[in-house]
Image (spheres, rainbow, N blue to C red):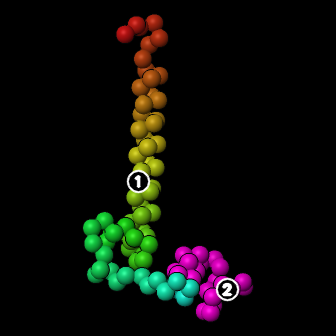
Amino acid sequence: MPTSPVKTRIPLTSFGHLITEVKRQLFGIEAPASVELTGLKKYFNSYTLQGRRNCVLATYAILLTTATAYFMHRQNKKEIPKDCKA
């Protein structure tokens, strides 16, 4: 299994953890504790599993809403008769 170039052995399939480990070792950047996060960062962040999950769910919700609005708008256009001038 390929490993990361940093000191600890992290599988390359775990890309998020690889980036976090590189930030910690090369740049000295530590992830903030969850009690330090305020506002939207508390719910949408890349540090905690709950924050990552919320980002994924928000993305899916936006895609679903956009697709629903598109299909509803498309159906409304089909229902309007072409001989009617408005």
Q: Is residue 21 visible?
A: no
Q: Which mark is residue 61?
A: 1
Residue closer to the observer: 73 or 24: 24
The percent coordinates of residue 67 (x first, y second) are 46, 42
Residue kind at label 2, given as amino acid type: Pro
The percent coordinates of residue 64 (x first, y second) are 44, 48
Mark 2 or mark 1: whose residue is earlier in sequence: 2
**What span is in magenta?**
1-23
Most common SS among magenta residues: loop
Q: Which residue is mark 2?
A: 5
Q: Is residue 62 visible?
A: yes
Q: Which residue is found at the position 72% from the left and 83% from the top?
A: 2
Q: Which residue is found at the position 29% from the left and 80% from the top?
A: 36
The percent coordinates of residue 24 (x first, y second) are 51, 86
Would residue 43 appear left or right of 81 to someone viewing this image? left
**What kind of element bears circle 2?**
loop
The CA span between labels 2 and 1 is 36 Å
Furthest residue in direction bottom, as rendered: 7
**What kind of element bears circle 1?**
helix
